[in-house]
Image (cartoon, rainbow, N blue to C red):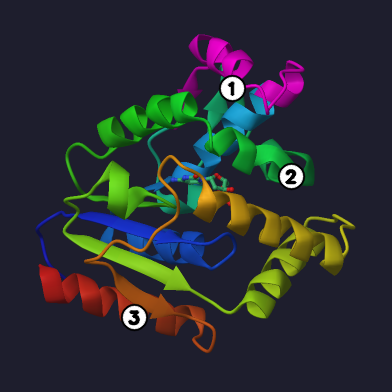
Amino acid sequence: MTQRKITIAIDGFSSSGKSTLARDLAEALNYTYLDSGAMYRAVTLYCINHHIDVNDATQVEAALPHINLHIPPALSKTFAIHLNDRDVTDLIRSMEVSAVVSEIAAISAVRAFLVAQQQAAGKYGGIVMDGRDIGTVVFPNAELKIFVESDIETRIDRRHQELIKKGNTTSRLEVKQNLLHRDNIDSTREDSPLLKAKDAHTINNTNLTRAQQLQAAIDLVESVT
Ligand code: DC
């Protein structure tokens, strides 16, 4: 494996498997892993807890100076996020947060607030970051950009199984509705919509195992380093 530490941007729709790939890749390369979606979720959790109307951009923007996010340096397996000194890694995965996070992520002030922090975290390379705009906005000069795709039924099944494992009783239909809702907002919003960067490589993992998906990404890393 190469010694040169590069920046790797991984984008894709919700539950496409991009976070799994990003974590596995960061671990294989001994890189930092950053789940940018977790930051949008933490801002969302703050707004829910403080009864801030997520559809009122002015109210949300006014809350931003009170939001301190911290991602302790750690390996990909132990990724955690703290919101005002409280570990919220599990709390941000609730359906309550998922239901409105796309509304929060469509607010330009929120994006500017988080993109600056994401760029600072990736300043020295050696990072795998996943999200929706990593290859297009956060790191337009990333040495490697991967766009992860998966068919919609597979994405619904994955997300549903993930929730069941956590003891959540959300129905498959609710999961489907939430994914379609987020796909729609994430790809049609005005600021930084989810787009495949022109120079991104696509990995469609519908028929790939986790190990095969990782190998496809490692092959790409080797082709650019
Ligand atoms: O990856 P995720 O499902 O945890 O992301 C949560 C939401 O945050 C998703 O609806 C889109 C948004 N998001 C974004 O707009 N830009 C990013 N870089 C990452 C996530």
Could you tell me residue 204's position as x and y percent?
Answer: 44, 80
In contact (CB < 8 Å): disc 3 and disc 2: no
Nearer to us in this view, 61 or 40? 61
In contact (CB < 8 Å): disc 1 and disc 2: no
Nearer to us in this view, 138 or 118? 138
Mark 1 or mark 2, which is nearer to you?
1
Near mark 1 (Cα within 10 A), the count class, few <14, some 14-19 or many ≥20, is some
Nearer to us in this view, 136 or 35? 136
Q: Outermost residue, bottom direction?
A: 207
Q: Earlier in the sequence, mark 1 or mark 3?
A: 1
Mark 3, residue position: 215
Nearer to us in this view, 18 or 54? 54
Q: In percent of the image, x 14 and y 76: which residue is there?
A: 223
In the image, what residue type sits under mark 2? Ala
Mark 1, residue position: 57
The stretch in magenta equals 47-71
Mark 2, residue position: 99
Q: CA distance from mark 1 to mark 3?
A: 42 Å
Q: In percent of the image, x 40 and y 44: which residue is there?
A: 192
Mark 1: which secondary structure? helix
Mark 2: which secondary structure? helix
Q: Earlier in the sequence, mark 3 or mark 2?
A: 2
